[in-house]
Amino acid sequence: MAILVLEQTPAAQPGQTVIVRPVFNFQHFTTPHGILMLVQFVVAIILFVLNPPIWLNVISWIVWIVTHLLIWIYLFSLNERYISSPPLKVIEFYFNAGATLLYALSSLPCFFVIAWISGFFGIVNTVAYGASVFFLFPDWKAHRENLPK
């Protein structure tokens, strides 16, 4: 899939302007994994507004920045344009597994001891990242089976 589309007038002369427009790929965000990425993004913003304890806030910021980067990668189809080893889905699998663990460890004490509303949205994000791990598992398994032995 192309990232940029060049539109020219039918008889473009050397001095004329060429319009360059980015092409967005919204198709990924119609899949369950893409919808979960948007849910993770929005719930993390809600967490920022609620001003949770520092450990949950730091984890939320770090994970939100990486999720934001992944959204832009999928939005501009950079994962299809550039080949990475290991594939982006495998990297994302490990990231989501780590984010699930970190959110669980920081949200549960927050929910039961400090601020239940911040803990609740942390648990919602824990479930969202865990569901992403579930949807990324087949890609991770396919990558593991294709490794040289």
Image (cartoon, rainbow, N blue to C red):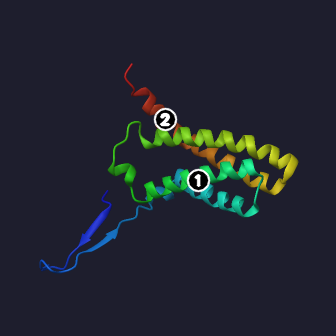
Label 2 residue SS: helix
Query: Can you name the residue that lies furthest to the right here?
Result: 113
Residue under the image location 45 percent in, 62 percent down: 26
Mark 2, residue position: 140
Residue under the image location 62 percent in, 43 percent down: 99
Label 1 residue SS: helix
Mark 1, residue position: 36
Position in image of residue 118 (x %, y %): 78, 55
Query: Mark 1: which amino acid?
Result: Leu
Viewer can see residue 82: yes
Viewer can see residue 123: no
Q: Nearer the viewer, residue 18 or 147?
A: 18
Drawn side of residue 46 relative to residue 68, left or right:
right
Position in image of residue 57 (x %, y %): 71, 53
Q: CA distance from mark 2 to mark 1?
A: 18 Å
Q: Nearer the viewer, residue 131 or 12?
A: 12
Mark sitting earlier along the chain (2/1): 1
Drawn side of residue 4 relative to residue 91, left or right:
left
Find out whether the residues at labels 2 and 1 contact each other: C-beta distance under 8 Å: no
Residue under the image location 68 percent in, 46 percent down: 126
Query: Mark 2: which amino acid?
Result: Trp
Q: Residues within 10 Å of mark 2 (few under 14, many from 20)?
A: many
Position in image of residue 48 (x %, y %): 70, 60
Report the quarter where the C terminus lies. Answer: top left
Drawn side of residue 132 relative to residue 29, left or right:
right
Q: Name above or below for residue 73 compared with residue 132.
A: below
Drawn side of residue 43 relative to residue 12, left or right:
right
Position in image of residue 85 (x %, y %): 38, 37
Report the quarter where the N terminus lies. Answer: bottom left
Residue under the image location 37 percent in, 41 percent down: 84
Q: Name above or below for residue 67 compared with residue 12.
A: above
